[in-house]
């Protein structure tokens, strides 16, 4: 149903996907390449702090031995001093290491977020038909976060524990080989068990995360459409929906809690047993006078350290695998190439000669990528003529908006062609960014962004625009007066954190926004919803001004619009069924006539009839 989280992007790599994993690890590491200087210093710090960790048990043992064996405290004081120096240096290096890794991680993740976002906004529109917004934002925020820890903290931890294990073992060997050999027999068993358990835990965690993500999608959907939810009294329904999802994740969460607790206990028991075993054998060696008490003390510390390092290593390994999964999703986004490129292709050198706003549809067939079995446009041929107004009418679902989407190149037709300008250049050859700078779309329910009115009007332009020019278009769009009525005028903030505008006001701002780019072709989707009559009049006037001396294609809902249009095209079920002027079509006694009579061309029809 509607609430099922779509899984359009692939999830964590399968275990057998080894080859891809290897590629990803290399690429994961290369993400931190720009931070190589920071990271190199961090690694030096890491080696220093690991080294101090490795030698401190040795001094620890020496303190014990000198306390036991020397008549005065001078020898012990010496070792205490060494121990202090070692701890001091170690802590300093640890602090530096932690800071350097963290800051490099932050840089990596900031850079990654920027490029992921940049890559997403350049995707084909069909990408947004199949991927939910919530999922995409979570890619940007949480997946990149996981990567951050992977490329820095995890890698550093991994190196640190590995160094610690190797260093400790070398030291231990030099102290007492037989005890070390015993330890080396125990450790692989311990680590194997821990890794296995850790793997199980990770799978549960992933499942838990997935369920949680599914419920966030439900929550986001409900919260972002609160008005619809409220107006249908669907609060409990949404709550139930959310509850169902949360319950699912809660069930897994409970299992996870048991498993995590079990893991902790398990690791504790295992390391405890290993320690007891070493203590027993070591005690025996001390008893037999084979080693000193100090050496046994050192050994116990080493054992603890090595066991802990192994436990951490396996958990770091888990995190790292999780990061590989996240990285796969991120790299997929980074690598995915939109089929409709935005900034390549032909830029007709002089607009006046090469693009006059005219567009030709030739035998266009189209189905939406998400519903490829349903043809939405069937063999449509039509011409938007230079300087003329073409009105699209027809029952809802007929394919009118789809015509706009093709002109905007949100999608490409399955077959047939769209041709641009007097030279009939295939639209696919044209630079899409350039195209969008020549075509403006005013939709039924215009979207304003959180920001000032001025920013919203100049949305379509990259460069700074003079306030004068903005005022000019706002006046044309009948928006200047109400904007001036606000205390902060053009600097008034609109959107979620600002002033709420009425439908008519939004529409006039949208018209101003369209006018500012002085489009060669204006695509206009007339509002079907009623505005108050004052606003209605102002919007209508603004629209008429915008249409004047321009090539226009309008999805018409008003009688006056179709009457004034140079030509009317009737679309039904994706087919062009009638075309001509209003008068011609009325004489034809076909669908158009019926539409007009059935007052599908809204209330103005009513008012002209009454
Ligand atoms: P109109 O503007 O005439 O009401 P549309 O062009 O919006 O018609 O829709 C034509 C058909 O395409 C409808 O059946 C509609 O359900 C379908 N449609 C519209 N947009 C999409 C989309 N993004 N994905 C899949 N199908 C769509």
Image: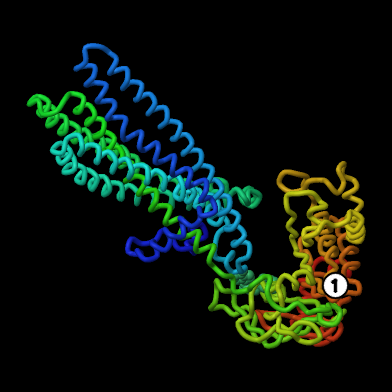
The x and y percentages for residue 327 are 46, 57
Q: Is residue 207 left or right of residue 109?
A: left
| Residue farthest to the top, as pictured | 72
Could you tell me how many numbered marks the image carries? 1
Q: Is residue 360 above or below residue 220?
A: below
The x and y percentages for residue 441 are 77, 67
Image quadrant for the C terminus? Answer: bottom right
Q: Could you tell me which residue is drawn at 20 percent across and 28 percent down?
A: 295
Q: Helix, strand or loop at disc 1?
A: helix
Q: Is residue 51 left or right of residue 379?
A: left
Q: Is residue 457 above or below residue 171?
A: below
Q: Quadrant of ligand 1?
A: bottom right
Q: Is residue 590 visible?
A: no
Q: Is residue 556 above or below residue 185?
A: below
The x and y percentages for residue 570 are 75, 80
Say which residue label 1 marks. Answer: 561
Q: Could you tell me which residue is drawn at 82 percent across and 60 percent down?
A: 513
Whether label 1 lies within 8 Å of ligand 1 gets the answer no
Q: 377 or 551: nearer the eye?
A: 551
Q: Is residue 236 visible?
A: yes
The quarter holding residue 591 reads bottom right
Q: Could you tell me which residue is drawn at 20 percent across and 37 percent down?
A: 174
Q: 247 or 303: nearer the eye?
A: 303
The x and y percentages for residue 70 are 21, 15
């Amino acid at each position: 149903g509607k609430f099922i989280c779509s899984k359009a992007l692939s999830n964590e790599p399968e275990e057998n996907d080894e080859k891809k994993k290897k590629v990803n690890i290399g690429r994961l590491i290369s993400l931190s390449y720009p931070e190589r200087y920071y990271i190199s210093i961090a690694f030096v710090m890491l080696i220093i702090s690991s080294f101090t960790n490795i030698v401190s048990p040795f001094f620890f043992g020496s303190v014990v031995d000198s306390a036991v064996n020397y008549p005065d405290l001078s020898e012990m004081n010496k070792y205490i001093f060494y121990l202090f120096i070692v701890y001091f240096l170690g802590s300093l290096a640890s602090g530096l290491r932690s800071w350097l890794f963290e800051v490099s991680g932050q840089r990596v993740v900031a850079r990654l977020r920027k490029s992921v976002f940049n890559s997403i906004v350049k995707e084909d529109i069909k990408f947004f038909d199949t991927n939910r917004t919530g999922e995409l934002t979570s890619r940007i925020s949480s997946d990149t976060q996981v990567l951050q820890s992977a490329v820095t903290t995890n890698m550093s931890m991994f190196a640190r524990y590995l160094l610690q294990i190797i260093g400790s073992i070398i030291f231990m060997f030099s102290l007492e080989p037989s005890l070390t050999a015993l330890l080396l027999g125990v450790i692989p068993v311990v680590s194997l068990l821990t890794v296995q358990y850790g793997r199980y835990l990770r799978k549960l965690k992933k499942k838990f995360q997935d369920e949680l993500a599914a419920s966030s999608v439900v929550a986001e959907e409900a919260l972002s459409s609160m008005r619809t939810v409220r107006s249908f009294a669907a609060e409990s329904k949404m709550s139930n929906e959310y509850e169902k999802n949360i319950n699912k994740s809660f069930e897994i969460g409970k299992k996870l809690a048991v498993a995590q607790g079990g893991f902790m206990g398990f690791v504790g028991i295992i390391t405890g047993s290993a320690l007891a075993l070493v203590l027993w054998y070591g005690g025996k060696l001390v008893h037999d006078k084979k080693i000193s008490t100090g050496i046994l003390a050192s050994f116990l510390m080493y054992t603890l350290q090595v066991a802990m390092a192994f436990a951490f290593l396996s958990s770091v390994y888990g995190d790292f695998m999780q990061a590989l999964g996240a990285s796969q999703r991120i790299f997929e986004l980074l690598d995915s190439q939109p089929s409709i490129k935005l900034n390549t292709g032909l830029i007709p050198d002089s607009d006046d000669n090469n693009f006059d706003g005219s567009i030709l549809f030739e035998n266009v067939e189209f189905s939406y990528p998400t519903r490829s079995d349903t043809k939405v446009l069937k063999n449509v041929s039509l011409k938007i003529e230079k300087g003329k107004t073409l009105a699209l009418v027809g029952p809802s679902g007929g394919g009118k908006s789809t015509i706009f989407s093709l002109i905007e190149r949100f999608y490409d037709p399955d077959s047939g062609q769209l041709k641009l300008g007097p030279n009939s250049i295939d639209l696919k050859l044209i630079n899409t960014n350039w195209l969008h700078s020549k075509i403006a779309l005013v939709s039924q329910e215009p979207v304003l962004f959180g920001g000032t009115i001025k920013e919203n009007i100049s949305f379509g332009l990259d460069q700074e625009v003079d306030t004068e020019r903005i005022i000019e278009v706002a006046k044309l769009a009948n928006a200047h007066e109400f904007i001036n009525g606000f205390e902060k005028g053009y600097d008034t903030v609109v959107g979620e954190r600002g002033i709420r505008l009425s439908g008519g006001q939004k529409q006039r701002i949208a018209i101003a926004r369209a006018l500012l780019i002085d489009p060669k072709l204006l695509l206009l989707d007339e509002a079907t919803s009623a505005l108050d009559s004052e606003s209605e009049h102002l919007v209508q006037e603004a629209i008429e001004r915008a249409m004047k001396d321009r090539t226009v294609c309008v999805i018409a809902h008003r009688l006056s619009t179709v009457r004034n249009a140079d030509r009317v095209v009737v679309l039904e079920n994706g087919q062009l069924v009638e075309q001509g002027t209003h008068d011609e079509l009325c004489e034809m006694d076909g669908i158009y006539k019926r539409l007009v009579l059935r007052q599908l061309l809204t209330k103005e029809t009513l008012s002209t009839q009454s």
